[in-house]
Image: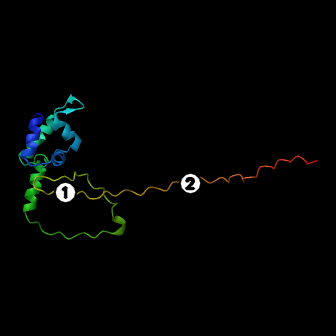
């Protein structure tokens, strides 16, 4: 895909340069270099990843989350079956666990338009730093006055 084809692709989708750059995950200026075909007088070609992303966007793919994993299929099958409601077990105050750090999940939109929203990560409080004791500064003493010569 050369510069002319990239521009034709963008216009066929009715996108501005800014919208196309955002859809491809690029900065607007980089997209402009690819669309122009040069940067500072040197030829520039869009990388393969950008060309493949253009094709994917043409096919209607917004994001790719990967293939279905076997455990995902099991979870989906399990979710379809109604489960008996289990009684929650009371937790004693001493047995409460520390807050769990949420798994890092990329907050991107998937093809269905729903994406998992990551829970906020709770930071552990920082311990207080011990302070050094201050040493008293020497009191500022005025400079001794110069003796004036006696007038005759």
Q: Which mark is residue 108?
A: none
Name of the residue lying farthest toward the front? 152
Task: Give the secondary structure at mark 2.
Answer: loop
Q: Residues within 10 Å of mark 2 (few under 14, many from 20)?
A: few
Q: Earlier in the sequence, mark 2 or mark 1?
A: 1
Q: Are marks 2 and 1 in contact (CB under 8 Å)?
A: no
Name of the residue lying farthest toward the top? 42
Colour scheme of the picture = rainbow
Q: 44 or 131: nearer the eye? A: 44
The residue sitting at 76% across, 52% down in the picture is 142
Note whether 99 is above or below 22 in the view shown.
below
Along the horizontal axis of the image, is 131 left or right of 97? right
Q: 76 or 61: nearer the eye? A: 61
Along the horizontal axis of the image, is 25 left or right of 61? right
Q: Position of residue 13 (x, y in %)?
A: 8, 47
Along the horizontal axis of the image, is 71 left or right of 102? left
Q: 109 or 57: nearer the eye? A: 57
Q: How many numbered circles are shown?
A: 2
The residue sitting at 8% across, 42% down in the picture is 9
Note whether 10 is above or below 118 in the view shown.
above
The residue sitting at 35% across, 68% down in the picture is 93
Residue tagged by mark 1? 116
Q: Position of residue 119 (x, y in %)?
A: 26, 59
Q: Residues within 10 Å of mark 1 (few under 14, many from 20)?
A: few
Note whether 110 is above or below 46 in the view shown.
below
Q: Position of residue 53 (x, y in %)?
A: 12, 42
The residue sitting at 63% across, 54% down in the picture is 134
Residue tagged by mark 2? 131
Task: Give the secondary structure at mark 1.
Answer: loop
Distance of mark 2 from mark 1, alpha carbons?
44 Å
């Amino acid at each position: 895909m050369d510069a002319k084809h990239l521009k034709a692709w963008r216009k066929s989708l009715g996108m501005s340069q800014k919208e196309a750059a955002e859809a491809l995950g690029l900065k607007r200026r980089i997209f402009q270099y690819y669309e122009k075909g040069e940067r500072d007088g040197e030829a520039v070609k869009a990388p393969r990843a950008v060309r493949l992303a253009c094709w994917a966007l043409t096919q209607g793919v917004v994001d790719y989350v990967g293939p279905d994993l076997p455990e995902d299929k099991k979870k989906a099958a399990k979710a379809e079956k109604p489960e008996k409601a289990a009684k929650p077990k009371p937790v004693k105050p001493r047995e409460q666990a520390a807050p769990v750090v949420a798994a890092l999940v990329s907050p991107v939109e998937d093809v269905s338009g729903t994406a998992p929203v990551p829970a906020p990560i709770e930071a552990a409080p920082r311990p207080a730093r011990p302070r050094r004791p201050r040493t008293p500064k020497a009191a500022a003493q005025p400079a001794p006055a110069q003796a004036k010569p006696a007038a005759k």
